[in-house]
Image: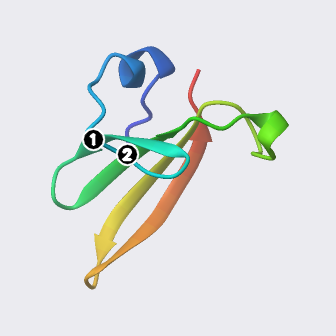
């Protein structure tokens, strides 16, 4: 799975906003979210990226990492 950098994701338009994340990429089968929360908010790290895949009709998180 491709890992996006913070610069790449911040350069993209936000497609939609969730409670704590910005949807940056959606292609029908994959979604890439960039969190607006930080370590101080209780996240494991700053600039968390969550990659979701559509599997059997449900979105499942398949990877999370810190965008650098």
Foreground residue among 42 and 8: 42
Residue 2 at x, y = what percent? 38, 38
Name the side, left or right, on which 62 lies relative to 30.
right
Mark 2 neighbour density, 10 Å: few (under 14) some (14–19) many (20 or more)? many
Position of 59 relative to 8 (above/below):
below
Alpha carbon distance from label 2 to label 1: 5 Å
Q: Under tag 1, what secondary structure?
A: strand
Mark 1 neighbour density, 10 Å: few (under 14) some (14–19) many (20 or more)? some
Task: Name the residue: 30% across, 33% down.
Answer: 14
**Circle 1 is placed at which residue position?**
25
Name the side, left or right, on which 45 lies relative to 57.
right
Label 2 close to label 1 by CB (< 8 Å): yes
Q: Under tag 2, what secondary structure?
A: strand
**Circle 2 is placed at which residue position?**
32
Residue 5 at x, y = what percent? 47, 22
Task: Name the residue: 17% across, 50% down.
Answer: 27
How many numbered tags mark residues here?
A: 2
Residue 28 at x, y = what percent? 16, 59
Foreground residue among 19 and 42: 19
Position of 59 relative to 47 (above/below):
below
Name the side, left or right, on which 17 lies relative to 40.
left
Task: Name the residue: 60% across, 41% down.
Answer: 65
Residue 3 at x, y = what percent? 44, 34
């Amino acid at each position: 799975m491709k890992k996006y950098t913070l610069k790449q994701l911040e350069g993209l338009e936000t497609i939609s906003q969730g409670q704590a994340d910005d949807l940056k990429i959606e292609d029908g089968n994959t979604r890439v979210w960039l969190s607006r929360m930080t370590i101080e908010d209780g996240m494991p790290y700053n600039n968390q990226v969550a990659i979701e895949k559509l599997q059997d009709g449900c979105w499942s998180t398949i990877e999370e990492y810190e965008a650098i």
